[in-house]
Image: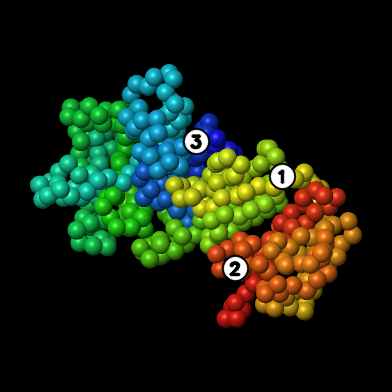
Amino acid sequence: MKLFLGKFFLFLNLFFVSLFGDTQLIKKENSDSNTTLLVIGGIHGDEPGGYFAASILATHYKIHSKNLWIVPNLNQESILKNSRGIHGDMNRKFSQLAHNDKDKETVEEIKKIITQQNVSLVLNLHDGNGFYRKTDKGNIFNPNAWGQTCVIDQCNLSNQPFGDLNKIAADIKERINQKLIEEHHTFDVKNTNTKFDDEAMQLSLTYFAVTNNKPAFAIESSKNLPSLSQKVFYHLLAIEEFMNIMDISFERTFELSEQNLVTILDNYGNLNINNNIFIDLTNIKKFLSFIPIKSESNAFKFSNPLGSVVREGQNFVVYIGNKKVTTLSPQYFEMLEPCKKEKGFDVVIDGKKFSLDYASDFFVHDDFNITRKDGYRVNVIGYKATGQVEESGIAIKLQDFDRRFSMDVDGLVYRVEFYKNDEFCSMSKVHFRQDNEK
């Protein structure tokens, strides 16, 4: 059973997240123009280059002029299963669709988004097999391959500012080929001539778009590229060149390189549970036990738009895209709602006193001591106490912890939980700094 999928963003650039039914639509807009680029990732759940590129576009890019809309995870259920389509190929459902098809709601929602009046150009992101070549050069490099292409359904679309599809695709090809990681990664234009030559493509998202007078392209990185970071690199490179052609002014928070993308892809962001637990998902252990939550109606919110939580048996499994990040074993409590409005707690850190908010992180070199507060009980998870019910008023060092209870794989982050009248209030985290950290 799929649970609440939160959308929670903590980034420098502001954007608006709306829902068409269950479809996540991220809007980065300006008032200077109605020109809008729509980028869609994840129509095939086993093509992570596309949907991870879309998520980075959502979280690490700022748009200064015109508009960018992003649907990062169109086929979310298939992404979780790393399947092309658990209910069949969603990209073959844009012409006719049975009333009882399980993808029907999602397909109808994305159709409504595509046909919005101010959508000027549509990009559908894929990872395709092999490396497209116009002549046959073997099993990987041949005309039947889809990888490393800018795909168009036809050459032109009349009476549209970006209607010269063939010229735009050729321009994109030339721009990308100037920035290749390896020489054999070359891009080319693949025109499927859909109306006359390709019945399967007549059922696709891009053909639906062009038949509704919307310029549309598919970008296909190669599944034969050796890493996810390379797939994402070429998708972002293509998207940026489309934004340049459309005069969409943008900036990103990083230099576009394969190595920087490795770092970004390894950063899974944060998970907020019920606004009283915040978990950094990067470098997290694969299993965390006794996480205090409500027995029902929990709100899971992510800083990464690909985040989701799935109930598996008694546990809650956390995913970023198709990557299983951690499993949370719950312990159910009544939640003390007013706790969020009260003053936080005092703590002595390395001999200095600080006042901290609930559900905050604090950093320690030597030891920390939570000041006692009337009516509250402190539970320091993993602290090897002897016969103590309440763990405030105690100076605690890193060596006092059982490393099995750390939240991170390095054994440096531990939970500090606050209770009032046996109701859970909030969880803070203590981070022990290593000797070379300031």
Q: Is residue 135 left or right of residue 43?
A: left
Of residues 191 and 360, the one nearer the viewer is 360
Q: Which residue is mark 1?
A: 332
Q: Residues within 10 Å of mark 2 (few under 14, many from 20)?
A: some
- Residue 137 position, x and y percent, is 10, 50
Task: Kindly state the secondary structure of the residue where label 2 is placed.
Answer: loop
- Tell me what residue is drawn at x 27 percent, y 62 percent: 181
User: Label 2, label 3: how many angstroms apart (C-alpha)?
Assistant: 38 Å
Q: Which residue is mark 3?
A: 23
Task: Kindly state the secondary structure of the residue where label 1 is placed.
Answer: strand
Please determine whether, in this image, residue 432 is positioned above or below residue 281.
Answer: below
- Residue 98 position, x and y percent, is 39, 19
Mark 1: amino acid: Tyr
User: Label 3, label 1: how many angstroms apart (C-alpha)?
Assistant: 30 Å
The residue furthest bottom is 436
Which image quadrant is residue 207 in? Answer: top left
